[in-house]
Amino acid sequence: MFKSLIPEHLHKDWLLHLSGFFTWSVICFLSLNNLPTGPELYLKLIGFLAFYLSFACIVSSQSIDYPKRDKLILLCQVILVLLLVKFDEYDIAPILLVLIATQLPSRFSRREAMYIMVAITAAHFFIKYDGHILNAFFHVIIYFMLQIFGFSAIESNLREVKAKEDLSAINQELLAARFMLKESSQRKERLRISRDLHDVIGHQLTALALNLEVSRHKVPDEFKPLLAQNLIQAKTLLSDVREVVKEMRSEEQFDLVEKLSDLIEQLPQCQLNVESSPEINALSLKQQLMFCLQEGVSNAIRHGKANQFTLSVEKQDKQLSLYLADNGVSQSTDKSATQKSHKVEKQIGSGLIGMQERLADFQGIVELIQTPVGCTLKIQVEDNYD
C-alpha cells in the first residue's frame, strides 16, 4: 500500500535519490556542527532545509508535470547554494552544486545545461576570488568538472531509459502490426480459396452434372441407373462445395470488439475495458474501423506511453460514434517542449488523415481529443448495409 503511493520513476532510481539525500545530510552536518547557537546557525539551517525540500520536489516529479515551476525552483536552488558557499567556512557547500547539475538533464537540453553550469561556475569564481586568480580558478574548476560528471551520468541514464521505452513502444507496434497482417493474410487466403472452389471446382462439377444428364438419355437402358447414381453424386458434391464456399465467406464477418481485444492482449501490460459494444452492419466498415482502432492504439502507445484503453459506442439510426480513450501522457505546453512535440503532432495529424481517408466512403469524421487523464480517439461514421 505504501509502495503504491511512491511514483514509479522513484522505484527505479531509489539508489540515486538516496545518495543525494545522504550527500546533503553530510554537508549539512559538517557545515553546522561547530556553529554556535545563534542567527547564523538558524539561517544556514533554513537554507539547507529549503535546498533539500526543493531538491526533493524536483526529483519526485517528472519533467512534464510542472516545467515552469521546476525551472523556478532550480533558480532558487542556485541562489541558495551560492549564498551558502559565500558564508561557508569549510569549503564543502559547493558539493551541492553537483546535486543541482544532476537535476538539469531532465529539464534542459545539453547546451542549455552547459550554459547554466558555466554561469554557476562564473558566479562561484567571483565569490571565491580573493586576489589570487589561480587559487580561485583551480578551486572552482574542480567543482565544475564534478558538475559535468554528475550531469553526464544522469543524462546517460535518461538516454538509456528513453531508448528502452522507445524500443518497447516499437516492439508493441510490431506486435500489433504482425497481428493485423496475420488477420489480413488469413482473410485474403480464405477469400482466394473460396473463389477458387466456386469458380474452378464448382464450374467443373456443374459441367460434369450436365454431361451426365445428357449421357443418361443417350446410353442403353442397362447403363442408365449407373449414370443416374453418378449424377446424384455430382450434384451432391456440387452442393457441398457451394456450402463450403458459403461458410468460408461467412467467416469474413467478425466481432470488432473480440478482434480488438485479441490485438491488445498481444501487447505487454496493455488492457482493454469495453463499456459498450458496437453493432455494425457493413463488413467493409468493420474492417476499416479495425484498421483505424489499431492505428489509434499504436499512436497512443508510441506517443503517450498508454497501457489502458476504454472502448465505448453510441449509435443513433445509421450514425455510429466510437470512442477509444487511453491513459497516455498529454503533450507538455512548455516552450522548451513545444519544438520537440511538433514532429509528434505532425505524425499524429498524418495518422488522423489516413483514418479519415479509410472512412471516406462512410462519411467518416476522426478527432483526437485531449482529456485530463489522456486522449480519446473519436470516430463518427455512417453504418449502411453492404
Image (spheres, rainbow, N blue to C red):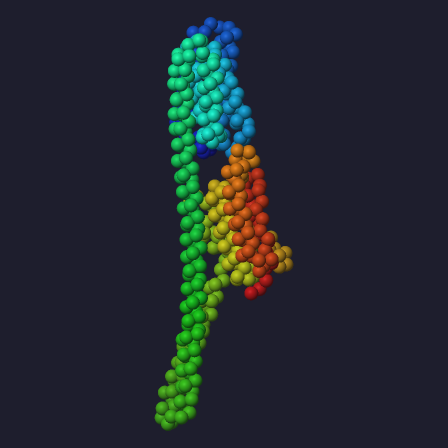
Vertical placement of residue 47 versus 278, above or below: above
Q: Position of residue 296 (x, y in %)?
A: 51, 49
Question: Percent x, y for residue 261?
Answer: 47, 51
Residue, far bottom: 220
The mark total stands at 0
Q: Nearer the viewer, residue 242 or 347?
A: 347
Above or below 146: residue 335: below
Residue 232 in sight in this render: no
Query: Quick one: quadrant of the C terminus?
Result: bottom right
In which quarter of the view is residue 179 placed?
A: bottom left
Seen at 42% across and 89% down, the residue is 214
User: In the displayed structure, does residue 187 sit left or right of residue 374?
Assistant: left
Q: Position of residue 24 (x, y in %)?
A: 43, 18
Residue 355 sits above or below residue 375 on the image: below
Question: Which image quarter: residue 244?
Answer: bottom left
**Going by the picture, which residue comes out furthest to the right?**
317
Q: At 50% from the left edge and 20% from the top edge, which residue is drawn?
A: 77
Above or below for 18 versus 374: above
- Residue 260 horizontal side relative to residue 378, left or right: left
Q: Is residue 43 visible?
A: yes
Where, by quadrant of the figure, is residue 374 drawn?
A: top right
Q: Residue 250 placed where, x, y %?
A: 48, 66
Residue located at (41% from left, 21% from top):
144
**Could you say which is closer to the camera, residue 348 or residue 120?**
120
